[in-house]
Amino acid sequence: MPAILCILVAFAIGALTGVTSADWATSGRPPLGALTIGSWVTWPALGGRDVDPYARAITVRSGTLPLGAGEGLEFLAARDDAGRPLQASCSYTVAGAMPAARAWTLTVYDTAGKAYGERAGFTSAEVLRAPNGEAQIVLSRRASPGNWLPLPAIGRFVLALRLYDSPQSADAAAIEPATMPRIIRGDCS
């Protein structure tokens, strides 16, 4: 095989390997810096100056704008409290206390990060609360009285809980699991 052909083949293999590995490394969620609290996962450094290059590349590629270090925290949940993946064929109740924050939102997303439906979430200002101040939000395909969010017809989904102007923004590791809402699976069809 002529030398030039060997060089071209080596270049093509190197380029293909580089593009494939860059695509793999910048898809999905950041591989470093995750903090898990119960069913919820957050990346506290994502909106700060000390974010790692992979997380920065993933953020740029996805087109999302993370909350700044002083703005708040975003928690994601793809599993219920028993560790099972969140499935649209099941109903769920998100219940319990919320961590301290000036405001919060809870939103249903598909696995690609797109908000589902016309009513994809609740804010802390509009949710109905029990006398003790706790909120209980039902997620299902069938309408339910009270705080209800519709789920897609099929597939998996992700919940995003955003805490705005939260004292925990400075030290997310200090959040106790008991202060995070529970995700309880109900009936499945």
Image (cartoon, rainbow, N blue to C red):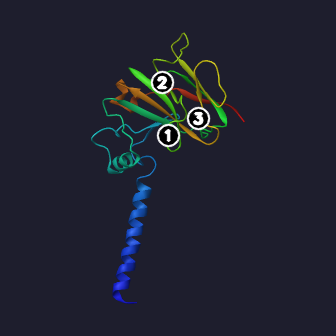
Q: Residues within 10 Å of mark 2 (few under 14, many from 20)?
A: few
* Mark 3 or 2: the one toward you: 3
Residue 98 left/right relative to 157: left
Residue tagged by mark 3? 80
Q: Quadrant of the N terminus?
A: bottom left
Q: CA distance from mark 3 to mark 1?
A: 20 Å
Please tell me how many numbered marks the rendered image carries. 3
* Mark 3 or 1: the one toward you: 1
In the picture shown, does residue 117 fall above or below 57?
A: above
| Mark 3 or 2, nearer chain start | 3
Q: Secondary structure at mark 2?
A: helix
> Pointer 3 and pointer 1: residues touching (CB < 8 Å)?
no
Q: Residue at x 55, y 33 (%)?
A: 117
Residue 174 lies, in percent from the top left, at 39, 29
Residue 67 lies, in percent from the top left, at 35, 34
Q: Secondary structure at mark 1?
A: loop
Residue type at mark 2: give it.
Answer: Thr
Residue 51 lies, in percent from the top left, at 31, 44
Residue tagged by mark 1? 114
> Pointer 3 and pointer 2: residues touching (CB < 8 Å)?
no
Q: What numbered label is drawn on residue 179?
A: 2
